Image (cartoon, helix red, strand yellow):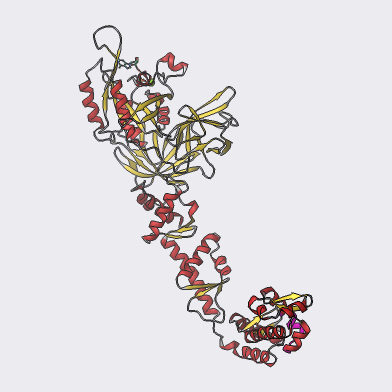
Amino acid sequence: MSKKHFVIATAGHVDHGKSSLVKALTGTDPDRLPEEKARQITIDLGFAELNLRGPDGKEIHAAIVDVPGHEDFVRNMIAGVGSIDLALFVVAADDGWMPQTEEHLQILEYLGVTRAVIALTKIDIANADKAQSEIREKVRATAFANAPLVRTSLRFNLTGLTGQVDQGLFELKSALASELSQLKPQRDIGKPRLFVDRVFTLRGIGTVVTGTLTGGTLRVGDSIVVQPRGNNARIRSLQSHGRDVDLALPGTRTAINLPDLKIGRDIARGDVITTAGFEPVRCADVLVERSPQVPSVTPIKSRSSIYFHHGTKRQRAKLVLLDSQSLPAGARGLARVELSEPALVFPGDRFVIRNGAERQTLAGGEILAPGGGWPVSLLRERSTATRDVDLFAKTELRHLQVCVVSELLLHSQFSAVEIADALCRLQERGEAVHIGEVAADVAAWRGLRDRASALIDTAHRQHPERPGLELREIRAVLNEQPADVIDALIVDLCRDGFVRDGSIIARSHHRAVLPPRLSAAALSIRERMAVKPFDPPSRQQLAPDATAQEAMRFLLQQNEVVEITHDVVVSTTALAQMREAIANFISKHGPATVSQLREALGSSRRVMVPLLEQLDREGFTRRLGDKRALASKSVSDKLSDASTARAD
Ligand SMILES: Nc1nc2c(ncn2[C@@H]2O[C@H](COP(=O)(O)OP(=O)(O)O)[C@@H](O)[C@H]2O)c(=O)[nH]1
Ligand SMILES: [Mg+2]
């Protein structure tokens, strides 16, 4: 897309000329409701489009959200300025700085809006210089200290003749274009969220919802989830900045056609449209900040009943202060917000707090930990840099201890790639553990490693005759951990100090030794097997009691004895000799029957039948009717063609 798209919202006291300015800029009257027309006042959000050209000549398209300035409708104003790129901050020269000028400024700051163009309106009826210096003074200590200021008049009689001439509109457009041209398009982190600000029905089309899309893209045909309700639906069609599109990009005003959803019952303003996989929460740990300019000097007390504004939703909540008793003007502190309804919040999301009577904006802040319940020290650490993905990953791991990478910071304003990169950096600095699909806090991981190595050491001590510990025993003891975590733990142990052999893990230096109590039994087994090595007694006969069985297990684990079937065991040396003898016999005489081989080796059917079956499976011999030929390439090469032909 060559054109850059941005979203602007107006802000400022009622009657200061916001809607008039939007109309003058765009030709669209943003006051669309009959009640707004009748009362000549903005009640709800209005929308218009503005095409601009940046100083570099590039086309810019801006959607304008016009907000109400009246104190009764601040909640609508907050819903309009949530995901914007730039504020068009309006102050009328005649009134100057008014209560909602201040309140809107604070709301913009609380919501993290950092760019604004200030329009000083109605300069035809008042002293602009005085108003301008007042504004400059008021914004001096805010994010908008250096915002461009443009004087406008929509009623300026330039020549003294009749007819109204607009003044400052050209300059205002240039200022907007210049500010927007410096902005980057909003980030795509693969986590689309659209905070619904309008829902309506179009005849023949059905339910349409609009909002500013953030965090990711939406596509026609996508399955979406309406949170916090959890309703699923499919996108029938999409409009972005007024045009039909297949793909809506982050940072654009987007209208979504969701014909399967019924307004009110299934979807309403305040809902969030997103993709599957995200869970709303009833509680969040947050950082709360109060402007030094709050109108009421009364500090916020812990457990205050408040209104919590997030996205386009406002709801009742309780604010529990975590590191102070009260929050005076200009202060910041940690708090827990207990919501009356679930909300889909990500760490880093901004919010606004208004008082229980909805007359004042009390504070704003940032979500630190959705779900809440974090220790204050960890929250404090996270609150020092809420855009720092490394810090977020580190603190998240400290809280979770161990997790699967795909779940780490899933609810966050970071993309999967950013999170993976952060993990690698933390791992390099020794501040996190990252093994395969698992990530862990360093101390927690050390704890798990210690527990596992203690289990292995105990096994070595209690059973020196065994090669090590069965992995399933580690899984059984650390059963609170998912299988992925144990797998990663085993990988980690084997990187350093331990070895794995099949299902057994041991210290690298561990060598199984025969404990004295088993030596007599082992000796007896060895002696009895040596009498007729190619036809030794059965396992049952060799190891009739528990001690002899333990000794047998040791010999098997040590690979001194090999199991052919459960009951047929031969010494490893005898097995090698038998293989050689079989190969020699067949090479010399051609394919042979079990009886021929049994006789040649001085063995028995009991041993020979399962042994040859095993050799067939191994690919050493090959069955030809009731005979065996040599199967392996190197050995069969030695066979003459004649003997193979004879077998066939
Ligand atoms: N004299 C004068 N009046 C203006 C100007 N701009 C807007 N107005 C008037 O101020 C009143 C409030 O304007 P409106 O756009 O509704 O203000 P809003 O509440 O901030 O949206 C209306 O009667 C407008 O006609 C201006 O530049 N000069
Ligand atoms: Mg208005």
Instruction: Point out the image quarter for the C terminus.
Output: bottom right
290 left or right of 31 in image: left
The picture places residue 153, in percent across and down from the top left corner, at: 28, 17
Q: Residue at x 60, y 81 (%)?
A: 559
536 left or right of 158 in image: right
The picture places residue 193, in percent across and down from the top left corner, at: 47, 38
One can see residue 480 in this view? no
One can see residue 300 in this view? yes
Magenta-colored span: 601-611
Query: In front: 10, or 178?
Result: 178
Residue 639 placement: quadrant:
bottom right
Q: Is residue 379 depicted above or below 160 in this figure? A: below
The picture places residue 582, in percent across and down from the top left corner, at: 70, 84
The picture places residue 4, in percent across and down from the top left corner, at: 39, 33
Query: In front: 569, or 227?
Result: 569
Q: Is residue 605 inside the magenta stretch?
A: yes
Q: Quadrant of ligand 2?
A: top left
Instruction: Point out the image quarter for the N terminus.
Output: top left
Residue 154 placement: quadrant:
top left
What type of secondary structure mainly makes up the magenta span?
Answer: helix
Residue 560 placement: quadrant:
bottom right
Q: Is residue 50 depicted above or below 282 in this figure? A: above
Query: In front: 85, or 308?
Result: 85
